[in-house]
Image (cartoon, rainbow, N blue to C red):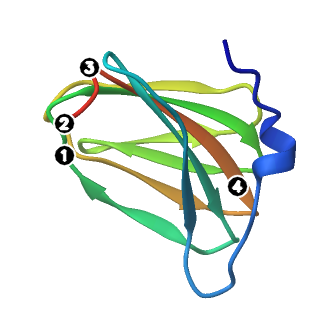
Amino acid sequence: MQAQQVARLREFDSKRFVSKLIFDSEKMRVVLFCLKAGQEVSPHSAPSEVLFHCIEGQGEAIVGDEKVDLAPGSLVDCPPQMPHGLVAETDLVVVAVIAPRPG
């Protein structure tokens, strides 16, 4: 069993968004994304389902052709093969749960 304190793992870079692998198992992967205001994770697709959980800040999740507002506590589901990305309006911290784990 692992306990992670997300607040302690957050880290920002003014040049590009920061992503950190914070959990990895046979069945799922969890990645922490930290974006400065104005940064984005360009839309991309993956064979797994992705669940974004906004921990801090304001922004948008892009899922296919839709844009969904992000605020602390928001959960956004991204179906497999659906393009998805993030845009930070303020400094933004998002946990992404990816399952099944990509090969």
Residue that badge 1 annotates? 45
Report how far apart the C-alphas of labels 1 and 2 lie in the structure. 5 Å
Residue at the image point whose x is 28% and y is 27% from the top: 101
Q: Residue at x 52, y 60 (%)?
A: 87
Q: Which residue is found at the position 26% from the left and 19% from the top? A: 100
Mark 2: amino acid:
Met
Classify mark 1: helix, strand or loop: loop
Q: Which numbered tag is attached to residue 92?
A: 4
N-term-proximal mark, 2 vs 4: 2
Crowding around mark 1 (Cα neighbors within 10 Å: few <14, some 14 to 19, many 20+) is: some
* Residue, far top: 1
Q: Which residue is mark 2?
A: 82
Disc 2 from disc 4: Cα separation? 22 Å
For badge 4, the amino acid type reads: Leu
Secondary element at tag 2: loop
The quadrant of the image that shows the C terminus is top left
Give the mark toward the camera: 1 or 3.
Answer: 3
> In the rendered structure, which disc, 1 or 3, sits on the residue that comes first in sequence?
1
Looking at the image, tell me whether mark 1 or mark 4 is earlier in sequence order: 1
Cα separation, mark 1 vs mark 4, equals 21 Å
Residue 62 vs residue 23, the one in the foreground: 23
- Image-based side of 26 in relation to 86, left or right: left
The reply to whether dot 1 and dot 2 touch (C-beta < 8 Å) is: yes
Find residue 77 and report its horizontal and vertical position in percent. 40, 23
Tell whether label 4 touches label 2 (CB within 8 Å): no
Task: Look at label 3 and name its amino acid.
Answer: Pro
**Badge 3 is on which residue?**
100
Q: Is residue 36 left or right of residue 43?
A: right
Q: Residue at x 68, y 84 (%)?
A: 14
Closer to the N terminus: mark 3 or mark 2? 2
Left or right for 49, reference 80: right
Mark 4 or mark 3, which is nearer the start of the sequence? 4
